[in-house]
Image (spheres, rainbow, N blue to C red):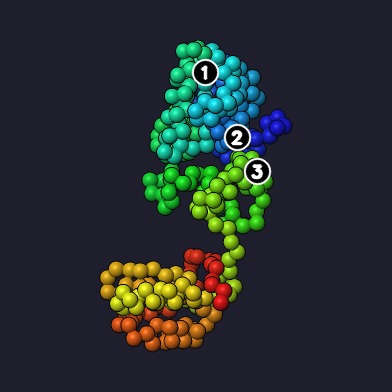
Amino acid sequence: MPKNTLLKYKSIQKFIAGVGKNIKKYFRKDPGCIIGLGDDGEIYGLGFYQWLSQQNKKIVFTTMESNGKGLEEDKVKGRKVLIVDNDIISGKSYKRAMETMRAKKEKLKIKEIKFAVLCDRTGLADFSVEGYSAYAPWSLEKLDGTDLKIIQALSENGRESFVEIAKKTGLSPVGVKNRVERLINEGVLKIQGLLNIGECYSVSANVEIEADQKTISKLIEKFEKSPLVYHLVKTSGRYNLLISIISPNLESIENFIAKEVREDPGVKHIDVTVGELPIIPKAWNPPII
């Protein structure tokens, strides 16, 4: 990799701006070693190494997995060590990596061991730029901050190249590709073509339905196949099914309610609210009949 290439990436710049001053104090004039942990940590660690090297610090760089695999032990002998990763989610990789290095500390005469990350959910890192919100509407066991950046990039432009996404996340194009494939294989991410709602529809409606459970099941099966229904959920209270529909015109909505809802003998009551197009979502994939 060309010298100092990583320093142009915004994620690396953010990391350095956030904790660079404290990391310089940590190393001072002592010889040090930066260890990039895994694929993400390799990129961020190398970025820090390039930055510190510009300042004539006695710093070397190596990588390892959280179990210590791949570590060049000669590079950490007699030095201060800084393990670098993108984020800490559950703390498992952090604990495994720190335990691995502490076990080697006496043998390799390591002076000190600290940990730096861009995002720290747990508060375990010695140096971190930010943490996650206490409220997170995703599973932190399946997604980390980098995954979310990749998903956001693809949601804005599903045809964006891995090279362009790599520039936004600080990963290599191969690293982005591997993450996307993992997320798809785990069923977390789905890439598909969507219709732009604003270009194809002009009006929406919410329909609350009260019916017995047999009728609700029958309606769900029918509405799942409807090209007008973009949201369908069972609810509690008087009404036990909520459907949200979009249409090119008000007449189509009126016909839908009259023929698809009111005519069913199991439907006891309905409440209809007509409005503008939904603010979100702005795109969806209707069933093609």
Label 3, label 2: how many angstroms apart (C-alpha)? 11 Å
Mark sitting earlier along the chain (3/2): 2
User: Residue placed at 50% from the left, 53% from the top?
Assistant: 188
Q: Which image quadrant: the C terminus?
A: bottom right
Percent x, y for residue 18?
A: 51, 34
Tell me the kind of residue under disc 2.
Answer: Ile
Q: Can you tell which mark lies on residue 80?
A: 1
Query: With respect to residue 283, does 3 lie above or below?
Result: above
Question: Is the residue under label 2 in contact with that under label 3 (CB below 8 Å)?
Answer: no
Percent x, y for residue 154?
A: 59, 54
Q: Is residue 96 left or right of residue 167?
A: left
| Location of residue 269 (image quadrant) | bottom left
Tell me the kind of residue under disc 3.
Answer: Pro
| Location of residue 123 (image quadrant) | top left
Mark sitting earlier along the chain (1/3): 1
Q: Is residue 123 left or right of residue 20?
A: left
User: Residue placed at 65% from the left, 35% from the top?
Assistant: 6
Q: Can you tell which mark lies on residue 43?
A: 2
Percent x, y for residue 218?
A: 39, 77
| Residue that mark 3 sits on | 173
In terms of secondary structure, where does tag 2 sit? helix
